Image (cartoon, grey):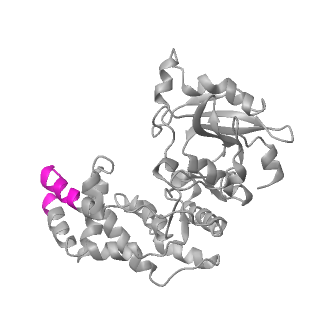
């Protein structure tokens, strides 16, 4: 982290970020503090951000302008986002995004990655306490272009893979301080079968047949996945919507944000996660084989690629597809469910 970055107000109310040291991983580290109860004191549709804005601006040394607050569709527990400007060390007013609260690990990873070029937005300020509330918050660079999409003329996936490659390079020397989250695959499989049986799931007979075949195979998939190398930090939520650029389309580079799900795993996890978002709309991939392209890109930039990555990817795809009926409340889009069924049927052939 540069001296300029420290002097830009990277601070909390009573404690600094401590040089960006990573916290011990836990479910709480990936969740923003739930401050919805504090909203009972706001009036006229006011937000928690509005209530805390005076102390936030004070903590930032009055470098932060007035904030225009809003809530995104995916924010929960009273969390808010705002647009403002922040006066940097040269006296320039820089467009920024203010987020509060954020998961602790998002703030910590944003801090840790400041020393690397074009990996994440510039972090101007942040802390883990604000206005007497125990919560993480941040003020970061507002990127002018994006998220990545069709305006990049087919280059969007290449830019995303370049960005995650820089993330892998930047995190390669970060010590592994945690064990990966272990899913209850037995419970997930049983819930998937119950969901197919108890709900009017489209193509339920095909699902039942595929899950019956998967019953003989899924423990092998679990074994392959559980035996994976655990020497990588993964973004955990890699998709086009989490990458933007400073340059106008179709130019890059892209930088990544929303680091709340960074985790220890194998890089294949990011690749399969990105792929599975297109199971219901494969034409949007325009022929891209994302896991394969990610493997090639890792080789290109000098990162290791183990020989068994393809089998690992196949196992992870099968496990994700098998899980879909168990989480219809989250992934219930009909096109996506049909796409997952096709992936599972291919896995059990």
In the displayed structure image, the side of residue 17 where residue 345 appears, left or right: left
Residue 164 makes an appearance in the image: yes
Query: Depth check: 110 or 154 in front?
Result: 110
Based on the picture, tell me whether residue 196 belongs to the magenta stretch.
yes
Quarter of the image where the N terminus is located: bottom right
Could you say where residue 257 lies in the image, as x and y percent from the top left? 59, 51
Q: Give the range drawn in magenta.
A: 190-205
**Residue at (49% x, 53% y) in the render:** 26
In the displayed structure image, the side of residue 338 where residue 7 appears, left or right: right
Q: Is residue 224 above or below residue 68?
A: below
Could you say where residue 184 lies in the image, as x and y percent from the top left? 31, 61
**Residue at (61% x, 62% y) in the render:** 163
Q: Is residue 68 above or below residue 196?
A: above
Could you say where residue 302 lies in the image, as x and y percent from the top left? 64, 78
**Residue at (60% x, 67% y) in the render:** 168
Based on the picture, tell me whether residue 122 belongs to the magenta stretch.
no
Residue 250 makes an appearance in the image: no
- Overall secondary structure of the magenta stretch? helix
Residue that extends furthest to the bottom in the rendered view of this protein: 307
In the displayed structure image, the side of residue 36 where residue 252 appears, left or right: right
Quarter of the image where the C terminus is located: bottom left
In which quadrant of the rendered view does residue 189 lie?
Answer: bottom left
């Amino acid at each position: 982290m540069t001296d300029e970055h420290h002097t830009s107000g990277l601070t909390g109310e009573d404690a600094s970020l401590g040089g960006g040291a990573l916290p011990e991983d836990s479910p709480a580290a990936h969740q923003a503090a739930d401050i919805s109860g504090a909203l009972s004191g706001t009036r006229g549709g006011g937000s928690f951000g509005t209530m805390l804005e005076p102390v936030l601006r004070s903590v930032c040394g009055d470098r932060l302008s007035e904030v225009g607050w809003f809530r995104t569709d995916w924010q929960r527990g009273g969390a808010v986002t705002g647009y403002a400007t922040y006066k940097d060390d040269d006296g320039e007013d820089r467009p920024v995004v203010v987020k509060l609260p954020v998961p602790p690990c998002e703030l910590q990873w944003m801090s840790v990655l400041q020393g690397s070029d074009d990996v994440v937005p510039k972090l101007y300020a942040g802390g883990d306490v604000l206005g007497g509330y125990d919560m993480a918050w941040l003020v970061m660079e507002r990127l002018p272009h994006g998220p990545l999409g069709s305006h990049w003329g087919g280059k969007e996936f290449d830019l995303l893979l370049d960005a995650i490659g820089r993330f892998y390079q930047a995190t390669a020397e970060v010590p592994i301080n945690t064990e990966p989250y272990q899913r209850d695959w037995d419970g997930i499989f049983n819930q998937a079968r119950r969901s197919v049986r108890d709900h009017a799931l489209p193509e339920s007979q095909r699902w039942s047949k595929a899950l019956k075949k998967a019953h003989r195979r899924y423990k092998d998939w679990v074994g392959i996945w559980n035996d994976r190398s655990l020497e990588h930090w993964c973004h955990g939520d890699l998709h086009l919507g989490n990458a933007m650029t400073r340059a106008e389309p179709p130019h890059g580079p892209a930088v990544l944000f929303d680091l709340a799900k960074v985790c220890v795993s194998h890089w294949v996890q990011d690749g399969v996660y990105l792929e599975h978002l297109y199971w219901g709309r494969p034409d949007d991939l325009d022929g891209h084989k994302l896991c394969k392209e990610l493997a090639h890109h890792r080789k290109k930039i000098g990162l290791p690629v183990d020989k068994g990555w393809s089998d690992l990817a196949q196992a992870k795809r099968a496990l994700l597809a098998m899980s879909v009926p168990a989480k219809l409340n989250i992934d219930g889009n009909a096109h996506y469910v049909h796409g997952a069924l096709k992936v599972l049927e291919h896995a059990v052939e």
